[in-house]
Amino acid sequence: MEKVEGLKKNKKIVDVLSSKKAKYIVGTTLLSVIGVALPRVFHVIAGSTAGATFLPMHIAVLIAALTFGITSAAVVAGSSIVCSYLLTGMPTLARLPYMLIELIIYAVLLGVFNKKFNSYISLIATIILGRLLYAGVLFVSINLIGLQTYGISVIESIKVGIPGIIIQLAFVPVIAKIMNERLKLKND
């Protein structure tokens, strides 16, 4: 009788952990951790400019958007940026709000585009429109509101970030597809 009760408890735990909500929460949490850890790995391997070149923090946000949707990607963006700053001091405090806005722009755009188009077209549209919107945010922040810049232009960030954009296009849709298949999710 005790074995039967134990099996019923185990089945309930498995059912809870197998639910879409649990997958969403665990996946979002893990992608947030990756959003903090991946930039550290790139900085150790490739030096202090690796973040601007390879855009590692973007990867976790983009995967979250394609796998779990806008809310998850926005949570990954915010938690990754804030936790990374608190744990490592990166991004710098001057760059933090701009990067947070940039990543949330990508989270929203990719989440919206992915509902209408395949992941590759969605990602390309997000990268292009995201950069344009981010340029607008920088322009308004610096020229109209008078906030300080952190010393990089959108054009320069695109040039420097080409390797990261290539990595995003090559790996993000593939990883998201694998996650969706393995987790048996359909991004709603």
Image (cartoon, rainbow, N blue to C red):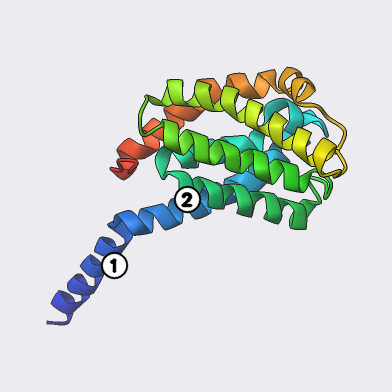
* Residue 151 screen position, x and y as percent: 88, 33
Q: What's the residue at 48%, 34% (across, down)?
A: 110
> Which residue bears the numbered disc 2?
71
Q: Quadrant of the C terminus?
A: top left
In contact (CB < 8 Å): disc 2 and disc 1: no
Residue 48 vertical placement versus 13 (above, below): above
Q: Amino acid at mark 2?
A: Thr
> Which residue bears the numbered disc 1?
13
Task: Count up the numbered dots.
Answer: 2
Q: Nearer the viewer, residue 14 or 104?
A: 104
Q: What's the residue at 59%, 39% (across, down)?
A: 105
* Residue 1 screen position, x and y as percent: 11, 82
Q: Amino acid at mark 1?
A: Ile
* Residue 93 screen position, x and y as percent: 82, 50
Q: What's the residue at 71%, 37% (across, down)?
A: 137
Q: What's the residue at 41%, 45% (across, down)?
A: 68
